[in-house]
Amino acid sequence: MNAKVDLHMHTSFSDGAYSPTELVLKAKDAGLTTISITDHDSVNGLYEAITVGKDIGVEVIPGLEISTDIEDKEVHLLAYHVDIENEELRKYLAFFRDERFHRAKRMVQKLRNLGLSITLDDVLAQASNSAIGRPHVAYALVDLGIISNYYEAFDKFIGDNGPAYERKIHVSVQSALKLINDSSGLSIIAHPGYMKESILINLIKAGVDGIEVIHPSHNENQIRFYKGIVNQYCLLETGGSDFHGGKKADEDNLGKYYISYNYLEAMKNMLQKNTA
């Protein structure tokens, strides 16, 4: 099947710039035939995206991006084909939506203590109805003219070592994997290029189903390395653009980072084995 599959993108229900409808339409225009919306701690955009996708001929795979902790480092797991009506999954999402709000309050207070004129309302205006995250704080800082671009916010203030950084409450890797498994999903290590090899190996040992090999942050050597890891450990291979749009200035990535449909078929085959 001649298809372009992008399994990593975000809507305005997390930290993306576009609504689910807008994103599906943009994906279609970019030549993508199958996508997965993987919003942070939210599946609310999937209902709209799946409906629009059916209308215009774009397959939308239910997805989710979850933050977890290993070796005292934050890592992200992508969950695919999750049952978005699963009760435990919905409880998890409600809890972390609330935690994100309180984290944003603490970051805003730290920024104000640094002398910056920013309020929680400024951040909430950026987040609208989505799960609040650091990108919304960055967007607010840009719009207020405090910094010149999205990335400067992380470099100067809210990056992991920044003066206004606030640690996020995470579930353990084991809890995250159980949550994904219990909601009938597959677990994939997101953008492993951001993590140490020891963390990657520990995640594999913990029982993840696959690795995101194709990602804008990965160079050719890294792609070859992760393909080798996938083959060595008999894991699934996925990939995508991690598209956000807007102030993140990654518009050119849509339709540029993708995988072929046979990798998606391998995922579906694993799901069938898991339910057999």
Image (cartoon, rainbow, N blue to C red):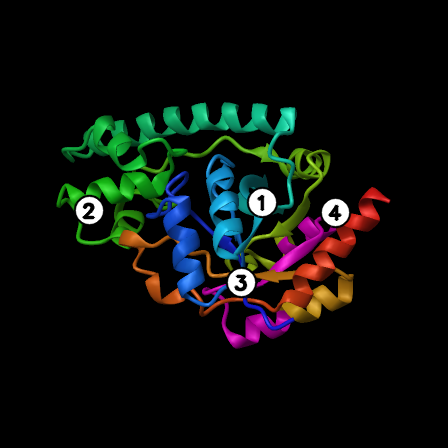
Where is residue 183? Give x, y as percent. Answer: 68, 35
Q: Can you tell which mark lies on residue 33?
A: 3
**Cβ atoms at labels 1 and 3 below 8 Å apart:** no
Q: Sequence order check: which comes first, mark 4 or mark 1?
A: 1
Please provide percent x and percent y for residue 232: 76, 66
Asked if the magenta segment contains residue 203, the reply would be yes
Image check: 135 left or right of 205? left
Query: Mark 4 — residue?
Result: 207
Dot 2 surroundings within 10 Å: few (below 14), some, or many (20 or more)? Answer: some
Assess disc 1: are there few (<14), some (14-19) or many (≥20) residues with their C-alpha within 10 Å of its C-alpha.
Answer: many
Q: Is mark 4 on a helix, strand or loop?
A: loop
- Cα gap from disc 3 to disc 2, whole angstroms: 34 Å
Q: 139 or 206: which is nearer to us?
A: 139
Foreground disc of the pair 1, 3: 3
Q: In the rendered image, which quarter contains the C terminus?
A: top right
Q: What stretch is highlighted in magenta?
A: 200-225
Task: Pick the residue in front: 107 or 99.
Answer: 99
Q: How far apart are marks 4 and 3 (CA)?
A: 30 Å
Q: Which residue lies furthest to the front in this view?
A: 55
Disc 1: which residue: 62
Q: Mark 2 points at which residue?
A: 142
Q: Is residue 149 above or below residue 262?
A: above
Q: Position of residue 124 (x, y in %)?
A: 28, 30
Look at the numbered disc 1 and give the secondary structure of its residue: strand
Spatial distance from mark 4 to mark 2, Cα to Cα? 40 Å
Tell me where residue 234 sits by quadrant: bottom right
Q: Which of marks 3 and 2 is in front?
A: 3
Give the distance between the C-alpha atoms of the residues marked 1 and 3, in whole angstroms: 15 Å
Can you tell which of label 4 and label 3 is closer to the viewer?
Answer: 3
Q: Are marks 3 and 2 in contact (CB under 8 Å)?
A: no
